[in-house]
Image (cartoon, helix red, strand yellow):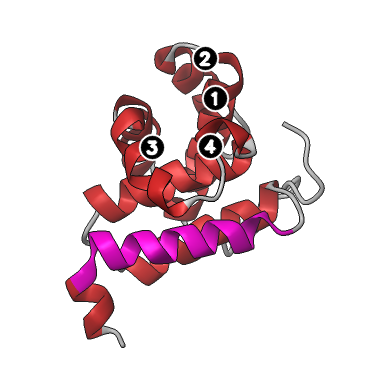
Amino acid sequence: MTTKTQHANPSKSRSPRHRAREFALQGLYQWLLNNEDAGAIDAHIREAHGFDKADREHFDSLLHGAINQSIQLREEIAPFIDRTIAELSPIEHAALLIGVFELKNHIEIPYRVVINEAVELTKSFGGQDGHKYVNGVLDKLAAKLRATEVSAGK
């Protein structure tokens, strides 16, 4: 995957969990484009440079969870997008899958962190304004999926 701002030299400031999200995004990108087996993608990603600095448990949760729950996750996303799922860029699609998966399955992670991380992934790997789109969709989803947390934060 070649993008304009891909991290050639991993920054020491990126947390293991952020790295897990980056690798999960790359795995989901591969899955969306090639419909490869999740196990093969997982094995390939684990050999990537810098994977040893990622939170492996969170990577497993994100990659396998998003693939296994992709139908349900897309159903959650669908009411909040202005196009079909198939028309989303693969990076936006993958970032949204990660974001909605975390909103639903990782309630220990504050919703603002989930949204920020998905936005940062899209900024790093996606098109020019994709992060704004991902932010808007996940903001609306958070209000639905984590209504109590969102209203408490306002």
| Residue annotated with mark 4 | 84
Disc 3 secondary structure class: helix
On residue 32, which mark appears? 1
Q: In the rendered structure, does residue 46 fall within the stretch colored magenta?
A: no
The amino acid marked with disc number 3 is: Arg
The amino acid marked with disc number 4 is: Thr
On residue 97, which mark appears? none
User: Residue 81: image x %, image y %?
Assistant: 50, 50
Q: In the rendered structure, does residue 134 fall within the stretch colored magenta?
A: yes
Compute the Cα span from label 3 to label 1. Answer: 13 Å
Total count of labels: 4
User: Residue 13: image x %, image y %?
Assistant: 58, 64
Nearer the camera: disc 3 or disc 4: 4
Image check: 88 left or right of 61? Answer: right
Task: Return the disc, 4 or 1, that comes first in the chain's sequence.
Answer: 1
Task: Return the disc, 3 or 4, that comes first in the chain's sequence.
Answer: 3
Image check: 144 left or right of 126? Answer: left
Nearer the camera: disc 4 or disc 1: 4
Compute the Cα span from label 2 to label 3. Answer: 16 Å
| Residue annotated with mark 3 | 74
Disc 2 secondary structure class: loop
Q: Is residue 137 above or below residue 143?
A: above
Q: Nearer the viewer, residue 137 or 97?
A: 137
**Residue at 39% of width from left, 64% of height from top?**
140
* Range of residues picked out in magenta: 129-147
